[in-house]
Amino acid sequence: MYYLCEIEDDNDIIKIALPKEKIIGISDKVVKSTKTCDFALHKNKLYPILTHADLKNPKFKFFLIFKDFAFGITRLIKETKSTPIEIIKNELYTGLIKEKEEYFIYNIEKLKPTQKVRYLDRNDNNEFDEEKFNYVVVDRKYAIAINNISTILSSKEIVKYPTEKFIGFVDYKKIIPVKQIKEGKYVIITNNIAYQCSDIQTANGKVLEGEDEKVLESNIGKFPILE
């Protein structure tokens, strides 16, 4: 089964289909970052917003939540059981679904972070209200400022190369060493270091400064801040 979706991009409307069995939820909440990637909020976890690789100025109202990312769309048209026509040797599309209109099954291996994007609310063409979270809490142990996060990747991206302090590295615009907080499916990328973890929650609060460390006193507890 597939979800039929539309994405508004400048004066064009892109019609795509996405596999329902890989989607774990839907969100209309966005957390903006000053870095390269914004995030969708779903069940108190953040998912990096990715989308169709060929879009220029898309408009997003909803985010389909996959295991490791959120896919931005403008409209969710309907669910379908139609049998797709296979497309051979195409990087972006793997099949075609024909109903009243044609929807191309998008290859979710070919994604990119959103760059120029306008976030719309679910009822109108008004801008989204940004969710007011300023930190993420990692494995209930540490806090990281959202503005310091470049993106969140799958732990499959880690190249294992154990040293005294690190478990390996990831290649994200440059080589970044990875520390393991807990073995899990996420890698949080900051400017100079990455952290492998299994759970990410949003939080807000105030920063308490001590002699040796900063601590986030938040709505879900107190956590040392990773700079």
Image (tube, rainbow, N blue to C red):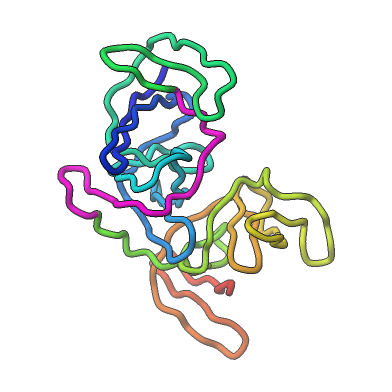
Q: On the picture, is 156 further left or further right than 114? A: right
> Residue pushed farthest bottom?
211
Instruction: Work out whether 201 lies above or below 209.
Output: above
> Residue pushed farthest front?
11
- Residue 38 among magenta residues: no
Task: Tally the marks.
Answer: 0
Residue drawn at (61%, 45%) of the image: 154
Residue drawn at (44%, 41%) of the image: 51
Q: Quadrant of the C terminus?
A: bottom right
In x, y percent, where is residue 34? 43, 66
Q: On the picture, is 44 further left or further right than 163? A: left
Predominant SS along the magenta part: loop
In x, y percent, where is residue 127? 22, 55
Q: On the picture, is 3 further left or further right than 197? A: left
- Residues shaded magenta: 105-127
In x, y percent, where is residue 58? 33, 45
Residue drawn at (68%, 43%) of the image: 156
Residue drawn at (35%, 53%) of the image: 30
> Residue pushed farthest left?
124
Q: Quadrant of the N terminus?
A: top left
